[in-house]
Image (tube, grey):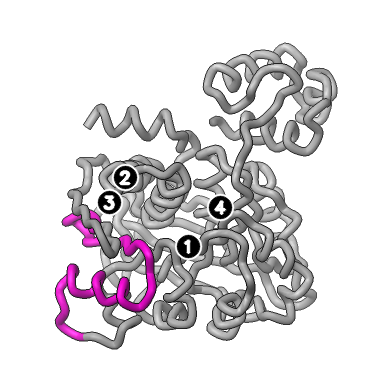
């Protein structure tokens, strides 16, 4: 979906019986434009005909970080210790927010629970979250801490050179701060969490009587151990090998042994990223490994977030491990070809067609 179509779907979700003219007035476009978009969305199966009914959807709640991303890209080979000519762009980011946007693109009803500052960056980020078709009733505002900001520099090939993260506000995402949203988490059909969330909050989450499946992204080697209290509750855990070793306290262990150990700790499905060697999906009874797809990389920001979103989407649909791996890697590959952290057309149809074209 285009950004405008995402806004249209969000408006329809909020007021399903609105007329085309009311939707046009709300979005600031013509009624004819609304009619054209609705026709296309109906053909794609995003809207189910009369009354603009949306397909029955799982209510997915994503608990994690949201950032204002500033991304620089060198126009030539990077020169350390020097001023490098290039371009700078601002976008909405954050692991939790990226996963939420990808799931919304894939057709899910998504609520993001995160903490924004009471500042202009927070206002801007809230608008971008809503524009992506994500429910905003889980957004909390902190009275004094600034909105999380992530500064990244990429080389001329789009590969990350270095980054600076000002994410102190995420530490304030405490159980006390989340208490008003406890029922939202408990009632969700699925909860997705990422390890930027404070350790005490993850331990608190493990005590909740969650109705739905629980998914987690380990994020980094330093933060992966925070997920230990959740291992026995996880439907899917996405990690790379260094994150898995940190989480388990293991050294020099191969990928299969790491994933088997995580399964013995209670994880139902381990999605172990193997970098350039692809992905290993492992359960207690089955295993599948698949290599990455050839891509023309524009930026590697957000590819891992797209991978876990694709796997969640496939798992919710009950697909086989082979199909889950293929679709997750397809989401990641398509995102690598986008200049931003999220591909604006990350739909199931688009991803499957992209895979067929490899």
Sequence-wise, the earlier of marks 1 and 3 is: 3
Residue at image x 21%, y 48%? 292
Front: mark 1 or 3: 1
Secondary structure of the residue carrying numbered label 1: strand
Q: Is residue 287 above or below residue 247?
A: above
Sequence-wise, the earlier of marks 3 and 2 is: 3
Q: CB under 8 Å between callouts 1 and 2?
A: no
Residue position for label 3: 76
Secondary structure of the residue carrying numbered label 4: helix
Front: mark 3 or 2: 2
Q: Name the spot of residue 280 as percent of width and height, x first.
A: 23, 58
Residue 38, located in which quarter of the rendered image?
top right
CA gap between label 4 and label 1 equals 12 Å
Q: CB under 8 Å between callouts 3 and 4?
A: no
Residue position for label 2: 320
Residue 260 shown left or right of residue 22 in the figure: left
Residue at image x 42%, y 75%? 231
Other residues around mark 3 within 10 Å, as few (<14) / some (14–19) / many (≥20):
few
Residue 223 shown left or right of residue 148 in the figure: left
Residue at image x 55%, y 17%? 43
Front: mark 3 or 4: 4
Q: Which residues are magenta?
A: 251-280
Other residues around mark 2 within 10 Å, as few (<14) / some (14–19) / many (≥20):
few
CA gap between label 1 and label 3 equals 39 Å
Residue position for label 4: 100
CA gap between label 2 and label 4 equals 23 Å
Q: Quadrant of the N terminus?
A: top right
Secondary structure of the residue carrying numbered label 2: loop
User: In this orientation, which residue lies closer to the viewer: 251 or 60?
Assistant: 60
């Amino acid at each position: 979906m285009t950004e405008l179509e995402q806004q249209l779907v969000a408006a329809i979700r909020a007021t399903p019986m609105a007329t085309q003219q009311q939707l046009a007035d709300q979005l600031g476009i013509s009624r004819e434009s609304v009619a054209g978009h609705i026709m296309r969305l109906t053909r794609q199966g995003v809207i189910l005909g009369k009354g603009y009914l949306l397909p029955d959807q799982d209510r997915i709640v994503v608990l994690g970080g949201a950032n204002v991303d500033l991304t620089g890209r060198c126009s030539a080979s990077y020169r350390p210790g020097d001023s490098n000519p290039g371009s700078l762009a601002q976008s909405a980011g954050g692991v939790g927010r990226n996963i939420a946007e990808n799931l919304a693109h894939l057709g899910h009803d998504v609520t993001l629970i995160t903490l924004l500052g009471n500042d202009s960056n927070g206002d801007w980020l809230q608008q971008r979250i809503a524009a992506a078709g994500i429910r905003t009733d889980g957004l909390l505002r902190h009275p004094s801490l600034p909105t999380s900001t992530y500064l990244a520099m990429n080389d001329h090939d789009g590969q990350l050179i270095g980054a600076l993260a000002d994410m102190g506000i995420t530490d304030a995402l405490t159980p006390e701060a989340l208490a008003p949203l406890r029922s939202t988490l408990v009632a969700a059909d699925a909860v997705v969490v990422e390890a930027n969330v404070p350790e005490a909050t993850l331990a608190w989450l493990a005590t909740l009587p969650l109705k739905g499946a629980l998914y987690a992204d380990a994020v980094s080697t330093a933060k992966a151990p925070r997920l230990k209290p959740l291992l026995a509750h996880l439907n899917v855990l996405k990690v790379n090998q260094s994150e898995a070793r940190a989480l388990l306290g293991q050294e020099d262990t191969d990928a299969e042994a790491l994933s088997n150990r995580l399964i013995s700790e209670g994880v139902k499905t381990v999605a172990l990223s193997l970098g350039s060697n692809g992905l290993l999906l492992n359960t207690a009874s089955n295993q599948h490994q698949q290599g990455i797809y050839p891509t023309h990389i524009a930026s590697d920001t957000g590819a891992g977030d797209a991978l876990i979103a694709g796997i969640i989407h496939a798992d919710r649909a009950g697909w086989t491990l082979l199909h889950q791996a293929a679709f997750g890697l397809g989401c990641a590959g398509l995102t690598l070809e986008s200049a931003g952290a999220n591909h604006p057309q990350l739909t199931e149809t688009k991803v499957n067609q992209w895979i067929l074209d490899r």
